[in-house]
Image (cartoon, rainbow, N blue to C red):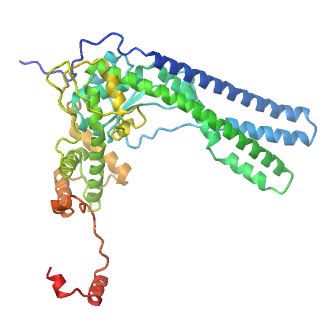
Amino acid sequence: MPRKPSLYPPSPTNVPEDLTQPTGHYRLRVFLVLVSTILFLLFYAGLVVGSGFLTVGSLLFLPIPVNVLAAGFCGLFFLFLVKGFFKRQQVSKSSMVEVTEDDQPRLFVFIEQLCDETGAPFPDKVFLNYQVNASVFYRHSILNMFVPPKKNLLIGMGLVNALNLGEFKAVLAHEFGHFSQKSMNLGAYVYVAHRVILDMVAGRDWLDNFIDRLCRSRSRVAVIGWTCWGIIWLFRQVLKGCFYGIKFLDMSLARQMEFNADLVAVSVTGSDAIIHALARLDFANASLNQAFQDLGVASQHNLYSSDLFHHHNHAADYLRRIRKDPHLGEAPPLPADEDLTVEVFEEGDEAGIPLMWADHPPNYQREQNAKEHYIRWPIDNRSPWVLFDDPRDVRERVTWKFYRVELGLRREVVLAEPGDVQQFVEDEHAETTYDPRYQGLYDNRFINPGEVKDLVKTAKAHPYKPQVLAG
């Protein structure tokens, strides 16, 4: 009996041992971010403690009524400082479907092998959504400063639908590269610093409303309000500079982390797979948006598909057809000589950065980084859908999330066969596609001529001459 092929693509055997080691630029930026964040947090802690002591000291040691005014001012400043520290950032899971090892054993075996190979911890939970993306996410908390957070993996089914298995492995390896980066632990400290600063600089809540009411008061209390308002305004300008400084250093570190994560992908898939994935993702997003638009039109006619990704594929074909490029969204073929490669991106071309990596370095720089030590390795052309048990059910569950989140659809609606809905979509496209001589200028333009009776009235009032109508 022939052996069943493995669902895990083999990894390169000629990878340098130090390929994924942090560079000097990486270490320098880690140091700068760490120092700047710690300095800010120490400065912040000093202000909190100082304003707290002044509030209590004013009440205990100053005479009435001066103590009330001083304590009121110091107390308001203390509240201004601490109110952002305890606010939480919630991660919305409304578009996500959680899957477990019992649901998807093949996917979990694949993830486990990739974690072992990249040295990353296994994700705490695995979620799916309908977008073209993959990411690491976790719940931000003050506790993360002392206890490493449990990281979750999000896999977009639009990504699964657009890539082949080798490219999919490269993208997940990139994300697991982040899982294993110790510099991600800095994120907890940077997050707290950003949250505190942003709340103090841009946050407007009950405390600001209270100070506004004090300022409008006709009593002596207005003095406290105006004094607080002036000092807080000045303090916000100083904090704004701190925020930009820390943010600049953090973004500089983030770029180095992305380069390093790309090299983790290179170490398990070769230099081409991650770059070919980059080349596909922008078009995959455009195709998915076209599918969203098509299904939105179909929903206006009470037609709802059970498979968003069936239409994703057809939308890609449609875009290639109207743009007259059958290879749109595909990476160029590799040369026969395995020592040679082909440049996919050009320097200065940043228009094609995929939405899921919009805050990353330019694609050209990422390609140069991935191919600095070029490793040619075959790319597995199978579909990542082979990793899913009962893919039809997965596609339908994720499609429900799309309808619920994007269109507000309720569960009572019956989903139709995707082929029937696609036929409607193609009929709609045919109705709004004009002669090729117009070069697509009028395609998909919906005409709203107005009320027929008004058009008839206008035609009678201003009739065309017979020779004009005759052409």
- In which quarter of the view is residue 303 placed? bottom left
Q: How many numbered discs sit on the rendered protein?
A: 0
Please identify the residue farthest to the right as the structure is shown: 63
Q: Is residue 289 above or below residue 91?
A: below
Front position in the image: 205 or 31: 31
- Horizontal side of 63 relative to 88 (left or right) equals right
Residue 407 falls left or right of residue 32:
left
Q: Residue furthest bottom?
A: 461
State the residue lying farthest toward the top: 17
Frontmost residue, 166 versus 410: 166
Pick the front one: 222 or 323 = 323
- At 35% across and 25% down in the image, what residue appears? 174
Q: Position of residue 8 (x, y in %)?
A: 22, 22
Q: Is residue 287 above or below residue 245?
A: below
Q: Quadrant of residue 385?
A: top left
Question: Residue 157: in sight, yes or no?
Answer: no
User: In which quadrant of the rendered image does the N terminus lie?
Assistant: top left
Q: Residue at x 83, y 38 (%)?
A: 71
Q: Which residue: 65% across, 39% down?
A: 200
Which percent across, then down, holds residue 123? 38, 25
The answer to whether 153 is drawn above or below residue 439 in the figure is above
Q: Please provide percent x and percent y for residue 89.
A: 53, 37
- Choose between 191 and 298: the one closer to the eye: 191
Is residue 416 visible in the rendered image? The answer is: yes
> Which quadrant, please, contains the C terminus?
bottom left
Q: Position of residue 185 (x, y in %)?
A: 50, 22
